[in-house]
Amino acid sequence: MKYDKTDIPSRYEQARKLPEETTKLWLETVSRYIPQGSIETIIDLGCGIGRFSKALADHFSAQIYGIDPSWKMLKEARGATLSTKVTFLRGSAEYIPLTDGLADLIFLSQVYHHIEDKKRAFLEIKRVLEADGFLCIRTSTIENLNTILYLRFFPPALKKDMEFLSSRNDIIDTVHSSGFKLKGHEIVRQKFANNLEEYCEKIKSRGLLDLVSITDEEFHDGLAKLEIYCKEQDTETDVLEELDFFIYTKV
Ligand SMILES: C[S@@+](CC[C@H](N)C(=O)[O-])C[C@H]1O[C@@H](n2cnc3c(N)ncnc32)[C@H](O)[C@@H]1O
């Protein structure tokens, strides 16, 4: 499903805003594998509303290009990000509108499963990545879906995710056969909300693709069950979930 055919872009910030410490956790995770001072230009590929773009630019003191095929996502990104270090451009993983060898780091966050032509995308990624550059993939996988709280209450959304997402080994095999060497793989436990009330509000805003892909009835049924569950729990608990992180260099 294309984001421009939905109204997710206007709700994305509310649905997916990360606590500051979670953004920091990801920046630290990326940095652990990268020699200090080696990053001048970054591509946030499939940047969406630019959730990570400015944070990456500031953290690495780098110039960053946020690329996305969705006009609506880019409009939100441009409206939310005021920085001379960040440029948003329309493009896709399959067609990156930048010159060869430009980037020291390419960051793909929750985009891997959206790429229809992986073969072409990895050729493009190789083309724009500098010889010693890094490719980072931050993504949900089939294996980490059982750590995502709301999916317990929305079986039809879980079913869509199971069909849509890749397994860890699938990603490792695909990227390896596209000419990249795995430098590291971690399962990162991130805080997604500071408490259950905040969590319910995020889910209620229905800014996640799997929740848009189910019927209104299925959505309202799941939401009612999630709200009951949240009321019964200690509402002050952090809401944690796991994502996979892969980092690659070119072979
Ligand atoms: C779940 S959002 C992730 C946005 C952002 N990276 C983040 O973590 O907040 C997925 C994004 O991938 C974009 N996308 C879809 N197909 C793509 C493709 N073939 N190449 C690059 N981006 C794509 C969508 O338009 C959307 O903005």
Image: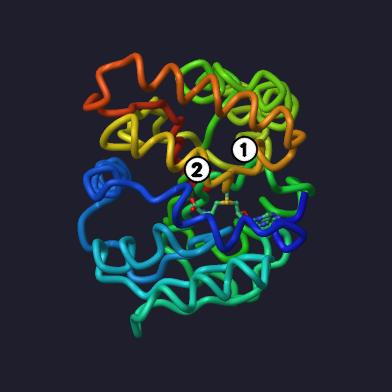
Q: Residue at x 51, y 69 (%)?
A: 66
The reply to whether discs 2 and 1 touch (Cβ–Cβ < 8 Å) is yes
Which amino acid type corresponds to the residue marked 1 in the rendered image? Val
- Measuring from the top left, give residue 91's x and y in whole percent: 67, 70
- Work out whether mark 2 precedes mark 1 in sequence or the reverse, and give the earlier one: 2
Instruction: Give the image quarter of residue 180.
Output: top right
Instruction: Tell which of 33 and 73 is nearer to you.
Output: 73
Q: Circle 1 is placed at which residue position?
A: 175
Q: Position of residue 34 (x, y in %)?
A: 29, 49
Instruction: Say above or below: 12 vs 144.
Output: below
**Label 1: which secondary element:** helix
Q: Quadrant of residue 159?
A: top right
* Residue at the outermost bottom position: 84
Q: Ligand 1 lies in which image quarter?
A: bottom right
Ligand 1 within 8 Å, label 2 CB: no
Q: Quadrant of residue 213?
A: top right
Tag 2: residue type? Ile
Seen from the viewer's position, the closer of residues 156 and 49 is 156
Position above or below: 92 against 221: below
Label 2: state its secondary structure: strand
Question: Is residue 128 rendered to the left or right of residue 61?
Answer: right
Crowd rating for badge 2 (residues with CA inside 10 Å; few <14, some 14–19, many 20+): many
Residue 24 position, x and y percent, is: 24, 48
Residue shown at 72% from the left, 32% from the top: 164
Name the disc covering residue 137, or none.
Answer: 2
Q: Residues within 10 Å of mark 1 (few under 14, many from 20)?
A: some
Vertical order, 29 against 144 (above or below): below
Q: Position of residue 142 (x, y in %)?
A: 60, 21
Which disc, if any, is residue 69? none
C-alpha distance separating marks 2 and 1: 10 Å
